[in-house]
Amino acid sequence: MARILESHWLTPVTRYFKLDAPLIARSARPGQFVMLRVREHGERIPITIADYDREAGTLVIVVQEVGATTKRICALEAGDQILDVAGPMGSEIELPPGGHVCGVGGGFGTASLLCLMRERRALGDRTTAIVGARTKELLILVDELRAICDDVEICTDDGSAGLRGFVTQRLAQLIAGQGPGRPDHVIAIGPMAMMRAVAETTRAPGVKTFVSMDPLMVDGTGMCGGCRVTVGGRPQFACVDGPCFDAHQVDFDVAMRRNKAYVKEEREALERLACVSGRGRGEKGDAEPSPEPSGSRRGA
Amino acid sequence: MPVKRADKTPMPVQDAGARAHNFGEVNEGYTPAHAAIEAERCLRCQDPVCVGGCPVQIPIPDFIHAVAAADMAGAAAILRASNPLPAICGRVCPQELQCESECSMGGRFRPVAIGHLERFVADWERTQPMTARPGIKHSERIAVIGAGPSGLVCAGELAQRGYAVTVYEALHAPGGVLRYGIPEFRLPKAILDGEIDRLRAAGVEIQCNVIIGRTITLDELFTAQGFAAVFIGTGAGLPQFLGIPGESLNGVYSANEFLTRVNLMGAYESEADTPVRVGRRVAVIGAGNTAMDAVRTSLRMGAEEATIVYRRSEKEMSARTEEYHHAVEEGVRFHWLTNPLEILDDGQGWAGGLRCQRMELGAPDASGRARPIPIAGSEFVLPVDNVILAIGTTPNPLLTRTTKGLATNKHGGLIADERTGLTSRPLVFAGGDAVTGAATVILAAGAGKKAAQAIHEALEAKRH
Ligand SMILES: Cc1cc2nc3c(=O)[nH]c(=O)nc-3n(C[C@H](O)[C@H](O)[C@H](O)COP(=O)(O)OP(=O)(O)OC[C@H]3O[C@@H](n4cnc5c(N)ncnc54)[C@H](O)[C@@H]3O)c2cc1C
Ligand SMILES: Cc1cc2nc3c(=O)[nH]c(=O)nc-3n(C[C@H](O)[C@H](O)[C@H](O)COP(=O)(O)OP(=O)(O)OC[C@H]3O[C@@H](n4cnc5c(N)ncnc54)[C@H](O)[C@@H]3O)c2cc1C
Ligand code: SF4
Ligand code: SF4
Ligand code: FES
């Protein structure tokens, strides 16, 4: 059980939560995640640890409504309890300190850059964040990132904030020496299509890149193998060996296909929830297009 | 003396046609009349060889004698003194390889149904009020990692000796394989819940959602948390894959994933959010208990053709005989001496076929079993919608990867003293599948029990 201390909407479909979870906050590292369950018979779902405060014993997560479980979580308020929170799961990214690290965030993936950039800066790295969204209203946590990064670069598809264009366009410019300059390491966290595009952008110039894979998971402890992703031609369990992997070794085709395995059942679960709660995907979801299976678990 | 019947008293079972489509327990349990007849079959041997076949040496003729005398409380006490999980072991022990394989009645006739009688007594005991809480006698607190049978038994035995015990479990519910692996139709969750309630009533604290090595390290259990000793019962949950092409296609599961979705997450219940997709034709690779559980579960989840594919023959199969018979009755198909080579794409990224090769048996291999040899030109494609891999599991490396000084063998198993369970680190003990690799419930329970005694002795020695 973990009590929600604070919660508010960051966008019409993305919600911020601060949880009272002292044991997890004490041992959390950037790149790790927790497994949540909100009710008996509920699904166990992985959610990235966006930030933590060891002294206060708190954990920040950012959840986007995409299906039945995330909708149930987003319906919770400060003071409510989350039935099960287990973690921290996964391995942290190992990077030599002192370089220029560029975090690329898309959708709620941006939230995961918070603790990552703070810790890298504390290690003496130069830190740049490139965050992207379709439009200004969907950008999240920009001020928080500005407070902990040397540079924050904004990209929107419609040009309503920052540069008009994709995060990969700005990343290519940095690699070419513009703005904050060529990064030594890139860490991309966002929708699968974005992470794949980042991997392609950094491949030829040879910039070491990590992506945070978000396969379907069941236990999150390395016991089922459902989360396997193909890395360098070999299966790896994202929940223990990852979730961050060398972007240039990941087989994105396989990963995107595997994430669509349960589209039909997920839709049914959502319809069941809509029947029970008397509210469909509508209301909060209207700002977003209908949930087209994008092959990614992360909202764009 | 009444005449001994030659045959075992048959276990009443649910009709095969009906049960293949429900999750109700297959074996319905002896009535008191069945139990009385079966108990009378025991010869009360001078030299009860059956006891030697039981890994925890239950005084079998004594408990059976008590059943025959209708002294149920006496029978239950005898069982529990040697085996803390009788309701579970009575159901899932491979009796035909253990106690019953040795039984003197087995020479000319059929062995006494020791497992069925054990289950009968334990099920009676479940209807009785629980015994009083033992109370804390010692100041040392003990941590147990993993709430599978080894950890639960170790915790229970230590609580009986007057220790405060905390069990840490990574998943949201205790039980280990008994919860996520063995299906409801073989081991109802109510039986497991009963054992867990009994432990809690004895004062054992169970903390779920704590992963030792991640949430708390093993070293922190001693330092920050102040435990005096630790027992590791983390099991062998890491599923193996074959490494053949097509394993990452959709619709290909490890048996652990498939069974966890169904058992732990309740995918067979309508209220559950966790889906599992079972197509019309399911092939399960392997022929152990896990394979039988997966193939019979897939029938119950709606598969029309559920097939076992195994590269050796029926003789080498490691599943319990009873489960195999039940699977045959339920309509499971068997491709013996068949080796899978490749899982074929149906054109949409899902499993569509299993390319196989027929085998024949050659000379014995390192395991002492006949080595399967491919027959040239025997390849064929089995049409499938799902492939479930039940080819074994190894110890989960999570804890050993995050802990210094825990020695392991080449299979990833913890190295532990056979008698005490002591590992390469002082006051850290281990047992069950984490040490032996995938084995049995009774071996795990026995190891937990031995380690509890060893922990008690080690702490006593420290006190003096
Ligand atoms: C390591 C890891 C870290 C993660 N971190 C986070 C996190 O920090 N925050 C977070 O919100 N999620 C995160 N996710 C994803 C999250 O786990 C899933 O969104 C969640 O499991 C969905 O569960 P559900 O029951 O709500 O939806 P489901 O019923 O499982 O399915 C979602 C439904 O929405 C559709 N859908 C899936 N992706 C999208 C999309 N991008 N846009 C529109 N529709 C979509 C699906 O096709 C399906 O119909 C992470 C996943 C992993 C593996
Ligand atoms: C499908 C299936 C069917 C089987 N059928 C039979 C049968 O009929 N008869 C029989 O005798 N045996 C059977 N077995 C084998 C038997 O279940 C196991 O041998 C037995 O459960 C091992 O017990 P254990 O306590 O060592 O480990 P497990 O039962 O594996 O339990 C280990 C527990 O530790 C937890 N854990 C792991 N790592 C950590 C960590 N770092 N921190 C906290 N917790 C952790 C796990 O989540 C798990 O709950 C079967 C096994 C399977 C998979
Ligand atoms: S515990 Fe298992 S082996 Fe021992 S007597 Fe009971 S059924 Fe037989
Ligand atoms: S060997 Fe068989 S007949 Fe003899 S005591 Fe044991 S159970 Fe009874
Ligand atoms: S989620 Fe089960 S092994 Fe990773």
Image (tube, rainbow, N blue to C red):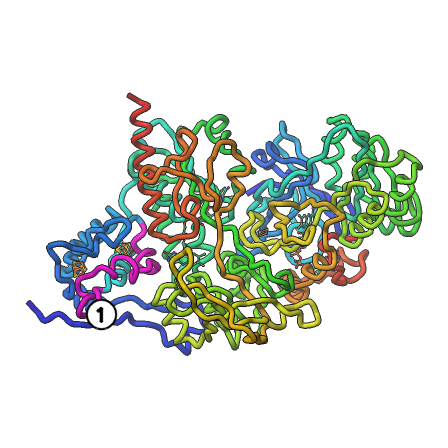
Q: In this view, does B267 lie to the left or right of B163?
A: right
- Residue B433: x and y in percent read 42, 48
- Residue B167: x and y in percent read 43, 40
Q: What residue type is labelled 1?
A: Lys
Task: Determine if residue B382 is in view.
Answer: no
**Taking B274 as reference, is B78 above or below it?**
above
For the N terminus of chain A, the quadrant is top right
**Taking B438 as reference, is B134 above or below it?**
above
The residue drawn where x is 24% and y is 64% is B113
- Residue B158: x and y in percent read 33, 37
Q: Is-magenta flag for residue B86?
A: yes
Classify mark 1: residues with Cα within 10 Å, few (<14), some (14-19) or many (20+): some
The residue drawn where x is 52% and y is 77% is B304
Task: Determine if residue B417 is in view.
Answer: yes
- The segment highlighted magenta reads B85-112
Label 1 sits on residue = B8
**Disc 1 chain ID:** B
- Residue B142: x and y in percent read 39, 33
Kindly state the secondary structure of the residue where label 1 is placed: loop
Quarter residue B179 falls in: bottom left
Q: Is-magenta flag for residue A234?
A: no
The residue drawn where x is 54% and y is 64% is B388
Count the marks: how many? 1
Most common secondary structure along the magenta stretch: helix
